[in-house]
Image: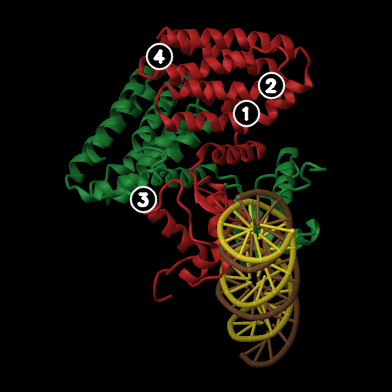
Chain colours: A red, B green, C yellow, D brown
Amino acid sequence: MPAERASERAHDAVLRHIEGSLRSGGLKLGDRLPGERALAEQFGISRASVRDAIRALEVMGIVRSGTGSGPNSGTIVVSDPSSALGSALRLHVASQRLPVKDIVEARVMMETWSLAHAAGADWEPNQALEARRLLEAMDDPDLPSPAFTALDAQFHVALSALAGNSVVSTMMDSLRESIREYVDEAVSARGRWHDIAAELRRQHWGILAAVEARDGDLAARLVRDHIEWFYAQTL
Amino acid sequence: MPAERASERAHDAVLRHIEGSLRSGGLKLGDRLPGERALAEQFGISRASVRDAIRALEVMGIVRSGTGSGPNSGTIVVSDPSSALGSALRLHVASQRLPVKDIVEARVMMETWSLAHAAGADWEPNQALEARRLLEAMDDPDLPSPAFTALDAQFHVALSALAGNSVVSTMMDSLRESIREYVDEAVSARGRWHDIAAELRRQHWGILAAVEARDGDLAARLVRDHIEWFYAQTL
DNA sequence: CCTGACACTATGGTCAGACCACATGGCTCG
DNA sequence: CGAGCCATGTGGTCTGACCATAGTGTCAGG
């Protein structure tokens, strides 16, 4: 072995190049990557290896691929960490490497932190309006449970976004996504959904009121009780 | 649109099957997946599509692939979320979707939470001994900075593991990994590493002492100061 | 009987070329 | 001028082959 290792794997070269372009700013959100055939020729590797690299970036939520032509086609830099981390976490939960109990505990930690900081941060009133609008949509008593939980997720994300830390909101969202299927199954399995939804609505409005009143301690306490109560009901 | 979608993509079938096997327990840590050629025949798709699925699982840290034969060959379930999430986060940081400032802030949140809980949890003494052993190794004044920061990372993980929440330790480790290169570059760029390392050692011993003394509030405060001081020095 | 060298085998990694499904944009024809 | 159609370029899939690797069995020679 004369040289240490020129490039362990063929597709690693593409990955390193793209990461470098991202760091240097040569590749920004919304930009399109060259076509797979062009990249293959550019790096002197086969298209299959290029696809390996693209697949890796897609799984990590860095790019999105679309067929056909036009603005929605090709491989585009999107940087969507939430769903990517959520999918990965979901599989690790499935492999029993990460217990659901720890996921919930981590979520409580992040949401309490977020709301405590949100109450003290300075945010535009329309951001809180977004949360209020979601709650109003959830007040519809005829809302099916999947739609309710979807709005529920958006509400929590919108609230935590007020803290101004994108990493925390992203991870919080990922944690929720990773166990969403378990929650949906549990919700649809047991009855009393109507009663549970009513209680959730009450808790949600209380949390929003606490944040709007800038009472961080109260908001943190309410959201902790909210999450723990819900998971005690379902899981 | 008569039927909704039988199977959007060819490789999705493999992914869903493997996730199902993980959830049902039919596939556990350390198990070997069938060979790529066998999977291709089993699902009636090409080997290229099977490889797409395997690649996705590998990027998510669910499996590890090795060539040749023997115990280290084939595709094996490993479930290593830390490095997978770390790589993904690193790229999102590179794309400027996630600011380094938020990463550090999230790390402070998780480490303070971990140490506060570690002080109150009941753990085996040998777990704390592991942390102590790492600190003793770091006391070597001739230790090069990369080795120091590697031990540093292990120390923080070992301490946070005492809290008993694998999700929080995993995410903490991923956050650290995601900005490791930035830190290493900053450390090697500026001088005074010797002085910085000395201060880090002092802080580390203080944190460990606080945890061993079961003083959660002090440990949390010290680790916050520790992290914020270090990043103020480097970034 | 032991021992070492060698071929065999099965694994993932790579390559090449082809075809398919899709979506757009421009072209043609009414 | 407008509606329909097709050329074009994208990723997605398939096929079949070959390569690099690392155990394992085999066989010749001691």
Q: Estimate the spatial distance between the alpha carbons at disc 2 and disc 4, rounded to whole Å.
A: 30 Å
Q: How many labels does the image show?
A: 4
Residue A235 % position (x, y): 69, 21
Q: Estimate the spatial distance between the alpha carbons at disc 1 and disc 4, rounded to whole Å.
A: 28 Å
Seen at 43% across and 56% down, the residue is: A18
The residue wearing badge 3 is: A23
Residue B34 appearing in the image: no
Circles 3 and 4 on the same subunit: yes
Seen at 47% across and 22% down, the residue is: A160
Residue B213 % position (x, y): 37, 20
The residue wearing badge 2 is: A235
Considering only vertical position in the picture, is C16 above or below A47? below
Q: Which sits in the foreground, A71 or A159?
A: A71
Q: Residue furthest right?
A: B2
Kind of residue indicated by mark 3: Arg
Seen at 31% across and 25% down, the residue is: B222
The residue wearing badge 4 is: A119
How many residues crowd mark 4 within 10 Å: few (<14), some (14–19), many (20+)? many
